[in-house]
C-alpha cells in the first residue's frame, strides 16, 4: 500500500474546498497527513470573524484531527519564512518554508507563491490538481468535480476552465 503524501495547505485552497462543501475530498485523500501553519489558521480565523461562516468547516476539520496545525520549529524554517515574507503573505511564506524543510507537498493557487515554491524545488499542487486526483482516484465523478468547481468559482475562485474534462 502506497503511503499518503504529506501536504501543507495555504488559505485559498482550503477555502475553495470549504466554500464548496467538499472538504471531504481533502480528508479522503490526505487524512492524517494534511497540515496548515499557525499563520494559515490565523487567516482562516480572520475570515470567520469577517462573516465567512463556511470557513468554520476548516476549524471543525482541525478539531476532528485529520487536518493538523503545525508550528515552524527549526531555525531553517524560520529563516526561510522571514526571507519569503518580504514578498509573500505570511500564510504562503510559512507554508513554503515548512514544505521545503520537511519535504511536504505545498497546495497553493497563488501565482507568486507557486513561482517561489518552484524556484525552491518544492512539490506543488492546487485546487484543480486535487480535484483531478479525486476524479482519477474515483473519489468523485467528473460531474461532481464540475459542480464543486462551479461552487468555488461562485465564491471568487478564478480559473479559466468551464469543466475539469478540459484537463
Image: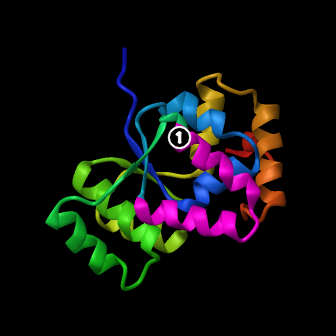
Residue 44 image position (x, y, % from top left):
59, 62
Q: Quadrant of the C terminus?
A: top right
Task: Determine the secondary structure under disc 1.
Answer: helix
Residue visible at 59% across and 52% down in the picture: 14
Looking at the image, is 114 positioned above or below residue 19? below
Q: Residue at x 23, y 69 (%)?
A: 78
The correct choice, above or below, for 57 with respect to 73 in the image is above
Residue 57 is covered by the magenta coloring: yes
Chain part drawn in magenta:
38-63
- Characterize the local packing of mark 1: few (<14), some (14-19) or many (20 or more) Cα atoms within 10 angstroms: few
Q: Residue furthest bottom?
A: 86
Q: Kindly identify the residue that appears in the image at 76 percent across and 66 percent down.
A: 51
Classified by dominant secondary structure, the portion drawn in magenta counts as: helix
- Which residue appears farthest toward the left when viewing the image? 75
Place residue 130 in its image quadrant: top right
Q: Is residue 43 shown to the viewer in this render?
A: yes
Q: Is 10 contained in the magenta span?
A: no
Horizontal arrangement in the rendering, residue 115 relative to residue 45 (left or right): left
- Its colouring scheme is rainbow
With 64 as the anchor, is 2 left or right in this view? left
Circle 1 residue: 63
Amino acid at each position: 500500500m502506497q503511503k499518503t503524501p504529506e501536504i501543507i495547505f495555504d488559505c485559498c485552497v482550503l477555502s475553495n474546498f470549504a466554500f464548496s462543501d467538499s472538504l471531504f475530498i481533502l480528508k479522503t485523500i490526505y487524512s492524517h497527513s494534511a497540515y496548515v501553519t499557525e499563520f494559515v489558521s490565523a487567516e482562516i480565523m480572520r475570515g470567520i470573524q469577517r462573516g465567512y461562516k463556511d470557513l468554520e468547516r476548516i476549524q471543525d476539520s482541525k478539531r476532528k484531527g485529520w487536518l493538523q496545525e503545525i508550528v515552524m520549529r527549526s531555525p531553517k524554517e524560520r529563516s526561510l519564512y522571514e526571507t519569503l515574507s518580504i514578498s509573500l503573505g505570511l500564510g504562503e511564506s510559512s507554508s513554503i518554508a515548512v514544505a521545503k524543510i520537511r519535504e511536504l507537498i505545498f497546495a497553493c493557487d497563488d501565482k507568486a507563491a507557486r513561482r517561489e515554491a518552484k524556484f525552491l524545488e518544492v512539490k506543488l499542487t492546487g485546487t484543480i490538481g486535487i480535484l483531478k486526483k479525486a476524479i482519477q482516484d474515483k473519489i468523485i465523478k467528473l460531474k461532481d468535480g464540475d459542480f464543486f468547481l462551479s461552487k468555488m468559482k461562485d465564491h471568487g475562485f478564478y480559473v479559466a476552465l468551464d469543466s475539469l474534462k478540459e484537463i
